[in-house]
Image: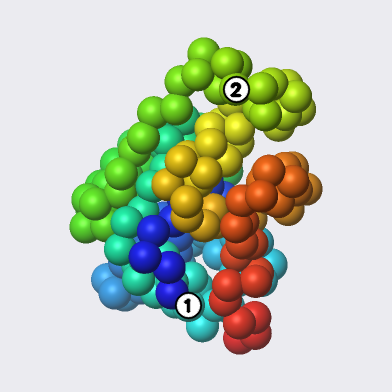
Amino acid sequence: MFPKAVIDTGPLFSVLVINYDLRLAELGRSPRFTSELADELRGLAAQRRLLALLSSIRDKLTTPHVIAELGGLGKSRLKLYGADRIAFWRTSIDLLIQWQIDERLVRLLDLAAEKSFQACLPDIGTTDTALIQLALQHECVLITEDERTLAREAWRQGVDCRLVTQLIPLGP
């Protein structure tokens, strides 16, 4: 669908959860984290569509800040500890390696120097501002689940920003 895309924390976290639950199913275990997904991603077909969509993108870009946010979400939302936490992250890292996800640092001081970002930086924060800048630098789509802040500002900046709900057909 897209040759290159910047991927936000929400869709990336959703895919890691989906990937982990699918691995559990392959081992004959019940999925554990479907309830942590957005409503539109709770069906298996929608989950497979999102995984296939993001897998199909040749060049997947994100920032180290997004990767760091994934760690926090893993703790706060999944409440994984010990062997379960290790298994989740091994599965997640395997997928990120397979995808050859490209982490690009967008420095705060570089963002602060850009007049177009000085106004939005305090409103949406450094992570989201950096994702918008990365999408602009690479002239590619930005994929997010965050319509309220990130998508709104990305559209204002002229970025081709797509919500997950726009990209995958909804339904079972």
The secondary structure type at the circle numbered 1 is helix
**Where, quadrant-wise, is the C terminus in this rendering?**
bottom right
Q: Does residue 167 appear to the left or right of 156 in the view shown?
A: left
The secondary structure type at the circle numbered 2 is loop
Q: Residues within 10 Å of mark 2 (few under 14, many from 20)?
A: few
Q: Which image quadrant is residue 15 in?
A: bottom left
In the rendered image of this protein, does residue 103 appear above or below residue 24? above
Is residue 54 shown to the viewer in this render? yes
Q: Give 79 or 140, whichever is nearer the viewer.
A: 140
Contact between labelled residues 1 and 2, with CB atoms less than 8 Å apart: no
Residue located at (30% from left, 49% from top):
101
In the rendered image of this protein, does residue 5 appear above or below residue 93? below
Q: Give 5 or 28, whichever is nearer the viewer.
A: 5
Q: Does residue 94 appear to the left or right of 129 in the view shown?
A: left
Is label 2 or label 1 in front?
2
Q: Residues within 10 Å of mark 1 (few under 14, many from 20)?
A: some
Is residue 68 shown to the viewer in this render? no
Task: Residue lying at the far bottom in this picture: please name it.
Answer: 172
Residue located at (48% from left, 70% from top):
50
Q: Give 91 or 3, whichever is nearer the viewer.
A: 3
* Badge 1 amino acid: Arg
Residue designated by label 1: 49
In percent of width and height, residue 1 lies at 43, 74
Q: Which image quadrant is residue 153 in?
A: top right
Residue designated by label 2: 114
What colouring method underlies this structural image?
A: rainbow
* Badge 2 amino acid: Glu
